């Protein structure tokens, strides 16, 4: 690889966290990049009795600066008010799809169900207690658009203790 291409094969960008204002560095290395590719994404979210986290989790997905192409939610037989919370979001966002298991089938089966339903180029798996930064999709999709041969795009995560924002 030439020195000129070596500098271009690595794309880097950063963002800051609201709590510490420390930069988080995101990097991707991919060979053979081309431009003009517009990838699509299915976000998969499996839930079992996480009603208390869903407003933040689904809110962070639905309020992305770049809207997801589809969000597939599998409720795995929740006995709390998870479905009620999810249905509130379904009324407001057309890209959400709810699949329901009558009884708890386990996480692996729920993930498999969501994957079978996914119809976009890429998938992002989000746990029911996860929160995405507002530009998560925009930044990751920009990288995937710039490097259409990439099979994966990865970013750092931060672990927040319960009760923190």
Image (cartoon, grey):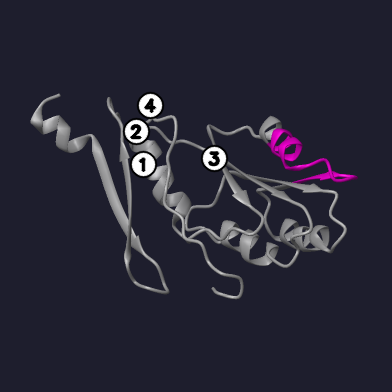
Instruction: Check if mark 4's residue and mark 1's residue have beta carbons within 8 Å.
Output: no
User: In the picture shown, does residue 97 fall above or below 135?
Assistant: above
Q: Is residue 112 magenta?
A: yes
SS category of the residue bearing label 2:
loop
Query: What are the residue bounds of the magenta stretch?
Result: 98-114
SS category of the residue bearing label 3:
strand
Instruction: Check if mark 2's residue and mark 1's residue have beta carbons within 8 Å.
Output: yes
Tag 4 or tag 3, which sits nearer the N-term?
3
Residue 124 falls left or right of residue 47: left
SS category of the residue bearing label 4:
loop
Residue of label 3: 41
Disc 3/disc 4 C-alpha distance (Å): 15 Å
Residue 53 lies in what quarter of the image? Answer: bottom right
Q: 63 or 164: which is nearer to us?
A: 164
Residue of label 1: 143
Disc 1/disc 3 C-alpha distance (Å): 13 Å
The location of residue 106, given as percent across then percent down, is: 78, 42
User: In the picture shown, does residue 162 fall above or below 127?
Assistant: below
């Amino acid at each position: 690889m030439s020195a000129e291409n070596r500098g271009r094969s690595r794309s880097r960008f950063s963002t800051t966290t609201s709590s510490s204002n420390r930069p988080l560095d995101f990097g991707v290395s991919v060979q053979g990049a081309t431009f003009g590719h517009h990838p699509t994404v299915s976000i998969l979210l499996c839930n079992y009795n996480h009603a208390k986290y869903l407003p933040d989790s689904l809110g962070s997905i639905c309020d992305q600066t770049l809207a997801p192409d589809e969000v597939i939610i599998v409720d795995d037989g929740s006995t709390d008010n998870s479905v009620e919370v999810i249905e509130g979001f379904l009324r407001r966002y057309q890209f959400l799809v709810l699949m329901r298991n009558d009884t708890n089938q386990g996480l692996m089966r729920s993930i498999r169900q969501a994957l079978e339903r996914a119809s976009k180029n890429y998938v992002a798996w989000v746990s029911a207690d996860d929160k995405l930064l507002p530009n998560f999709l925009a930044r990751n999709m920009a990288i995937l658009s710039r490097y259409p041969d990439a099979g994966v795009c990865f970013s750092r995560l931060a672990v927040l203790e319960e009760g923190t924002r």
